[in-house]
Amino acid sequence: MKFPKETNTYCPYCRKHTVHKVKIPSKGRARKMSIGNRKHEKSLKGHGGKRAGEKTVKKQGKRQRVMLICPECNKKHERTISGRTKKKLEIQR
Ligand SMILES: [Zn+2]
């Protein structure tokens, strides 16, 4: 999936359309004590086991996000583009 480097969009702070810069937002750090991480760690410890080659869960695509930066007020706002996709987001040159 491709997205242009600059787009003319609405800035909620300036309340008008300006040419925004587009960046991919950096991923935040995972919390160690979150329930998902705790479950994953527990499964790595052993006990329970699994049958090889059998998958019950289908992988779900992710919602791609872009960070829009307004050149006039230098403020950022995020936008999710389209629905869930398995394709990675690229910014066009
Ligand atoms: Zn602005």
Image (spheres, helix red, strand yellow):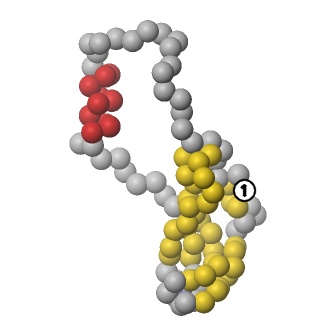
Q: Amino acid at mark 1?
A: Lys
Q: In x, y percent, where is residue 51?
A: 43, 9
Work out whether 17 lies above or below 2: below
The quadrant holding residue 40 is top left
Q: Residue furthest right?
A: 93
Name the residue at 70% across, 52% down: 1
Name the residue at 54% across, 33% down: 59
Name the residue at 27% across, 19% down: 45
Q: In x, y percent, where is residue 33?
A: 23, 42
Number of residue marks: 1
Is residue 10 found left or right of 44 in the rendered image? right
Is residue 54 found left or right of 46 in the rendered image? right
Work out whether 84 lies above or below 79: above
Work out whether 64 lies above or below 71: above
Q: In x, y percent, where is residue 75?
A: 49, 81
Q: In x, y percent, where is residue 56?
A: 48, 21
Give the SS element for disc 1: strand
Quadrant of the drawing holding the C terminus: bottom right
Name the residue at 56% across, 61% down: 80
Pick whichever, 60 or 41, lies toward us: 60
Is residue 40 found left or right of 4 in the rendered image? left
Is residue 92 found left or right of 32 in the rendered image? right
- The residue carrying mark 1 is 2
Q: Quadrant of ligand 1?
A: bottom right
